[in-house]
Image (cartoon, rainbow, N blue to C red):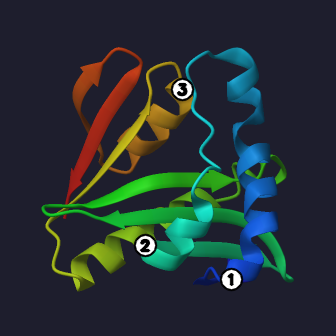
Amino acid sequence: MTDIRLRAAVPADLPQLVKVITSAYAAERARLSGIPDVTEGLDAHIREDIVQLAERAEVLLGVIVLVRQENALMVANLAVSAQAQGTGIGGQLMRLAETMAREAGYGRLSLRTHVGMSATRRFYAGLGWVETDLDGQVVCMQKSL
């Protein structure tokens, strides 16, 4: 998708970020219990962590939130708006996360997802992620770089 532009988020993006994330999770939140509101704390993530956006023609379509940890760069959130899901934006954002992790000297990425989000788990597995732990409704995954 050559017409997708990736860029760092700024505080003014916050209202659109909330809309994209809400759209991305709407179907799963309606279907599953125990999915937290992942829009909370976005302003702090923009200030303190790595938040990258995917947009086309200045329309925000996806976001990835990366948090620096001691031994891994954690994907705290990956969200693609409902209308843009299945278009490759999620994969593009995940490749960006891998590049950023390598450039920062990390040897692996980590994330947590809901046990009931089977399509999401298959997406990550298809990108080489491995499930490392299951704790109630939370599946921990990692990818070695």
Task: Tell me which label, 3 or 1, sits earlier in the chain.
Answer: 1
Residue 43 lies in quadrant: bottom right
Q: Residue at x 16, y 79 (%)?
A: 105
Taking the image as shown, residue 140 lies to the left or right of residue 124, namely left
Q: Nearer the viewer, residue 16 or 61?
A: 16
Residue type, label 1 = Thr
Task: Look at mark 1 in the image and give the residue it sits on.
Answer: 2
Say which of marks 3 and 1 sits in front: 3
> Reading the chain from its start, which is encountered first: label 3 or label 2?
2
| Above or below, comparing residue 143 to residue 120 in the picture | below
Looking at the picture, how far across and down is residue 112, in whole percent? 37, 39
Q: Which mark is residue 71?
A: none
Per the image, the residue denoted by label 2 is: 49
CA neighbours of label 1 inside 10 A, class few (<14), some (14 to 19), many (20+): few
Binning the other alpha carbons within 10 Å of mark 2 as few (below 14), some (14 to 19) or many (20 upward) gives: some
Measuring from the top left, give residue 14's x and y in whole percent. Answer: 73, 69
Residue at image coords 81%, 66%? 16
Q: Residue at x 57, y 33 (%)?
A: 36
Q: Amino acid at mark 2?
A: Asp
Q: Vertically, is 34 above or below 13?
A: above
Above or below 121: residue 58: below
Give the residue at mark 3: 117
In the drawing, does residue 100 fall left or right of residue 88? left
Comparing labels 2 and 1, the label whose residue is closer to the camera: 2
Of the pair 84 and 110, the residue shown nearer to us? 110
Q: Decide if residue 138 is in sight here.
A: yes
